[in-house]
Image (tube, rainbow, N blue to C red):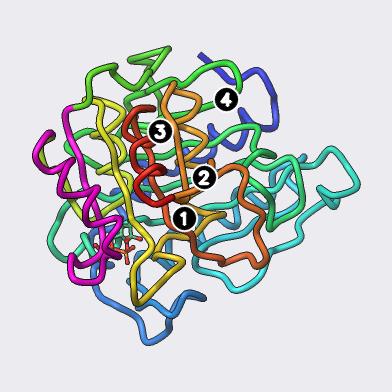
Amino acid sequence: MTVSDPVVEEVVATISRSATEIRQGLIGRRGTVDGENPSGETQAEADVWADELLGDRLASIDGVGQYASEERPDVVDCGDDPATSDAYAVAVDPLDGSSNLKSNNAMGTIFGVYDAALPARGETLVAAGYVLYGPITTLVIATDETVAEYELSGGERRLVERDVTVPEEPVVYGFGGRVPDWPDDFRAYAREIERELKLRYGGALIGDVNQVLTYGGTFGYPALESRPAGKLRLQFEGNPIGYVVEQAGGRSSDGERSLLAVEPDELHDRSPLHVGNDELIDRLEAALA
Ligand code: AFP
């Protein structure tokens, strides 16, 4: 099943074809480099390599006017300005969860296709999704038509679910950050959820969100006492994941409103991130009100 917009389909096909190569390329790139990413975090060799590989390929697609990555300080202009043309801007977290590389746990590649110049509100997304490097390499793509899941092998993608929806009954939860760093209102909410659902927290947003899409529940990386904006990046993680979960019938929130409605100031803005079943996000927002 291809995506109807030809430029979006080319972006998705490029990421899909690159995923097998990225997975293979993780071997031998598990160390860290001296540099830091624009968020001040240590970079794995694989972070830099995956960003260069995807950047070159995505920036060369006709119809892609901007490429931006969690690993690069600035937007790369690579075609018509999305602000004044029908070109798209592609934002990528090339390797989400790279600290899981050392421990050989799940990781992902996240992408968002914005019909606007970056930084942009999530409401301007026309497609978003992620590759999950798990036991099987899978690809989830959300458009305004549907959310579909594919298995990837040898650069090909095979459709396994054409209408992914968040299950009605929540089963799992995962909350990031350290418990003593949680604000009291969030901690009270978390204590309720912990008594109702099963803990699933793997340290890579993509692995944890895929649990929520598969079993129902909620994932959150909340505002922290030490970091009121939380840890995760709006353009590269919050918006794409918020779009996927909302298109799958769930909700997203920064604690007050849909992540897709948050107005960014800077390309690397962080935001508290909560996604999952409607009722759980309603309760979260009530707890933080
Ligand atoms: P890394 O890419 O540095 O491993 O960070 C992964 C991440 O951005 C996101 O994928 C996780 O949900 C979150 O950080 C985990 O953060 P903690 O290490 O604080 O639990």
Left or right of 207 in this view: 71: right
Range shown magenta: 171-196
Crowding at label 2, few (<14), some or many (≥20) Cα neighbours within 10 Å? many
Q: Which mark is residue 155?
A: 3
Tell me how far mark 1 sits from mark 4, CA to CA.
Answer: 18 Å
**For the residues bearing labels 3 and 1, Cβ distance under 8 angstroms:** no
- SS at circle 1: strand
Q: Earlier in the sequence, mark 1 or mark 4?
A: 1
Q: Which residue is mark 1?
A: 93
Ligand 1 quarter of the rendering = bottom left
Residue 60: image x %, image y %? Answer: 69, 49
Q: Which mark is residue 248?
A: none
Q: Which residue is mark 2?
A: 111
Label 1 beta carbon less than 8 Å to ligand 1 = yes
The amino acid sitting under disc 2 is Phe
Q: Residue at x 77, y 40 (%)?
A: 63
The amino acid sitting under disc 3 is Gly
Q: Total number of numbered labels?
A: 4
Residue 181: image x %, image y %? Answer: 25, 71
Label 2 beta carbon less than 8 Å to ligand 1 = no
Residue 35: image x %, image y %? Answer: 42, 84
Crowding at label 4, few (<14), some or many (≥20) Cα neighbours within 10 Å? many
Crowding at label 3, few (<14), some or many (≥20) Cα neighbours within 10 Å? some
